[in-house]
Image (tube, helix red, strand yellow):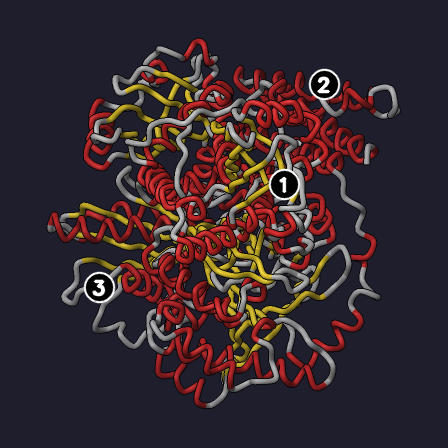
Amino acid sequence: MKDKRAPEKCLATSASPGAALRQMAEEIIGGDAQESRKDLPLLTPEAMQQALHELHVHQIELEMQNEELRQAQAKIEDAKERYFDLYDLAPVGYLTLSVQGSILQANLTATHLLDVVRAELIKRPITRFIYRDDQDIFYQLCRRLISTGEPQTCELRMIKSGGALLWAHLDATQAHDESGASALRIVLSDFSARKRAEDALQESYQALHSILDATLDGFWRIDVHGDILDVNPTYCEQSGYSREELLQMNVLDLEVVECAAATAQQTVSLIETGHGQFETIHRRKDGSLWQVEVSSTYRDAAGGQVFVFLRDISKRKQAEEKLQLAANVFSHSREGIMITAADGSIINVNAAFTHITGYSRDEAIGQNPRILRSGRHASEFFESMWHNLSQKGHWCGEIWNRRKNGEIYAEMQTISCVRDSNGEIVQYVALFSDITEIKAHQSKLEHIAHFDALTSLPNRVLLADRLRHAIAQAQRRGQLLEVVYLDLDGFKAINDQHGHEAGDKLLIALSAKMKQALRECDTLARIGGDEFVAVLVDLPDVATSMPMLNRLLAAAAQVVHVGDLALQVSASMGVTFCPQQDEVDADQLMRQADQAMYQAKLAGKNRLHFFDVEQDRSVRGHHESLEHIRLALVEREFILYYQPKVNMRTGEVIGVEALIRWRHPHRGLLAPAIFLPVIEDHLLAIEIGEWAINRALAQMEAWQKIGLDIEVSVNIGARQLQQKNFVDRLRAILQAHPQVKPSRLQLEILETSALEDVAHVFQVIEACREIGVMFALDDFGTGYSSLTYLKHLPVALLKIDQSFVLGMLDDPDDLSILKGVVGLASAFRLEIIAEGVESLEHGALLLQLGCEQAQGFGIAAPMAAEELPHWVATWWGNSDWRTLPSASKEDLARLMASVELRAWIKAIDNYLKGERATPPSLDWQQSYLSQWLRGIGLDRRTSHPSFAALDKLHTQINVLASEVCDLHAKGHKAKKQARLDELHDLQDNMLEQLKTLA
């Protein structure tokens, strides 16, 4: 039952209806809703419709200033839908549609309006609920919305579950679904009653030419007992009763039982005096309820009859509820909101503002936003901000501010101007959210994307960027640039003989020595296992570089002590120059230096070789010529191998990855790394890419004939992805294999390839999704890994690069990165799969991180097509993967503590051996292990017998580590070594104790 409302008095309607309605909305927002209703004007149907339109336009002018503001408002709507029941309790229906017209989300009001349960709406096309003759109206609305980007409205008939028709008013805007894909937002309201009323009024007006029958309000003529003597067609339509039926009724018969008791005295007073105004609820003949304002100011003195007007105030009540909803959004939004006067003084803030800044509402009111300034931005930053506000009426960007406690934080902020009817600025509205953690995480990911995890040298991505800048700089300054490709001789033998740990330590030491051999302005990058590239800049001539090249060669040949081992390798170096007679780009320089390095290998190793354009033109090294590759394609020398992808928890084979191989007639089976780089920027890459898709589809058809229906993913190169007719070509290939469902084909793209032209790749992925083909983002984490790109690339799957997976057992940073990437995938609602899983221990830790899908040599190596069916049928039954332990958060915390301990002791060893300049942090109270012991461990002190020993060991290890470092600093080698051995024994004991907690 609705609350009683105070009577309303009529106002002069000289002002526009929209202005009156806006005044009413402002008064209600101000909080005095009861008093504001006294000044509400009585409006005709046409005026009411015009007023609603003006209010809608006014709201659009304020709120839809630019694309950034619309996105901010969409976030507010998303927050409202997720966190508040008001979404489902709204007086209007809300529908979220995909761009294909499928219903993605619906609130309860929408289900009630269409008389269906929510499950019958979701994923159904909206046209299923639109009356057939009115479907074209909806299609035209969608076309207008997509072409203009502006909100659109229409009115049409919809079909309820039982077949009944619903007159619906649709407000449509562009939006995004939870994965960031484009979507449509539909606000659905029922105006069936109003439609019937309008039709009845129009017919009566034309037939009788009567002002009474033309009014939107219903009309009664009643006697002193409340019996209805006359009624106009409007009320007949509104109530659903015929004129004849109403003439047999008393006015109290039309009120619902709940309201009759509350308004009985007011009704009696109205009958007796002929004066009165109050609100009540009437029940229609069909049982539905509607809100009515009853008013009378005239009584027939002769007959004692009273003329009563009845106004349908249902829509007004809905408007009041919407305004209340807007107020709730302000109060409960998770984004901070700050409203200032034109002079900049703060006049209102919401609770999120207080949560983010630390300032209470009372502390903020009357202050200037300058109280939040961090001091990080120059005056030019704020001048640009105010220039945009004055010229465009809005500003959006990132800004660093300071909380009340002095802490600096980053926020994404949007500021909009609010103008009055004369165009003068009266207020500023700022919406902001705290993005400090996001920026910190993004910065860490970008560092990982640009630097090698083992040596901390620039990786291939950063090298490519620096090389392009160096080429431009050399051309601008007229100086020489050298590119040096360096490959270690004999490194594989050390790895095989002494293990990967010794090999890693050797690489770290040599990287530091080679970097010291170069200047600060030069770049040394690691691009592979034992392959490095140096870029030497600002050289006047070749002779100037010779001392540096010799130092680099000597540094790579130095002896490195790893424990008791004395390890030594040499290097083969290839050198090329820029500029050359012909213009060359970064990729050509890399290939030239690589070829020169190969010649150094052939000449006996431990030397350098200069690339000569004329003499070395025929030298291909490990690269095959384009002609050979083209011939191999014609001779059908290429084949596809397939590496399974599985769910480690259930054993399900979720698909396979198609990997190209070259059956070379003389060199045997060649990996793609040997020949694919040659064609990377050539049209031949497109031919081979299309061959791979065709071959994979043909193999899928063959597998289907023997009962194996499995998803296959195929890698797509940047060149093929960027072609304009990629989608048309893909569609033609799929049509050539009609037995294969497009949804069983998945395309994998490298992160770096996708970022070359995000807009184009987005369009390609969207077009392929319409066909049914989904995309996966390969080697995630090795590119820029920007959250913005994740948001705008509608891929379905992230593949974690194997470099992070291989190192996660011994490197806490790799483990943290994996944990963060899994969290990102969960936040963006993406599937995730890990590459490079080589052992059960890798699999167990991945499961504890929340990643169940994996591929790698620990599961299965790439295999020929004919081997796959048997492997799929037998692998799980004969596999140790079935015994993987169950995962828990506590196990993950324990394993992270173990990894951190090993890495910390390893860092101390490196410091004592001189392989790092400073010791790791000895403030063990701040370590993850210490925090875990103090936090999670405290709960288990009395319940687990090993905990006391574990706590004691932890203290002993940290005290002993400080003593060892102190002995090293004082030069006590013998004592240091003895204590170091004790430290390693304590470490082993500690790791064993941690295992007992499992």
**Secondary structure under the numbered disc 1 in the rendered image:** loop
Image position of 141 (left or right of 189): left
Residue 186: x, y in percent?
49, 52
Mark 2 neighbour density, 10 Å: few (under 14) some (14–19) many (20 or more): some
Mark 3 neighbour density, 10 Å: few (under 14) some (14–19) many (20 or more): few
- As measured in the structure, the alpha-carbon distance from the residue carrying label 1 to the one carrying label 2 is 22 Å
Residue placed most toward the observer, 516 or 34: 34
Q: Quadrant of the C terminus?
A: top right
- As measured in the structure, the alpha-carbon distance from the residue carrying label 1 to the one carrying label 3 is 42 Å
Mark 1 neighbour density, 10 Å: few (under 14) some (14–19) many (20 or more): some
Checking the image for residue 956, the label placed there is 2
Q: Quadrant of residue 439?
A: top left
Q: Which residue is mark 1?
A: 810
Q: Which residue is mark 3?
A: 584
- As measured in the structure, the alpha-carbon distance from the residue carrying label 3 to the one carrying label 2 is 60 Å
Residue found at x 74% / y 73% = 871
Residue placed most toward the observer, 714 or 980: 714
Residue found at x 44% / y 24% = 9
Q: Amino acid at mark 2?
A: Gln
Residue 828 position (above or below residue 295) = below
Residue found at x 73% / y 77% = 869
Image position of 393 (left or right of 829): left
Residue 99 position (above or below residue 848) = below
Residue placed most toward the observer, 147 or 414: 147
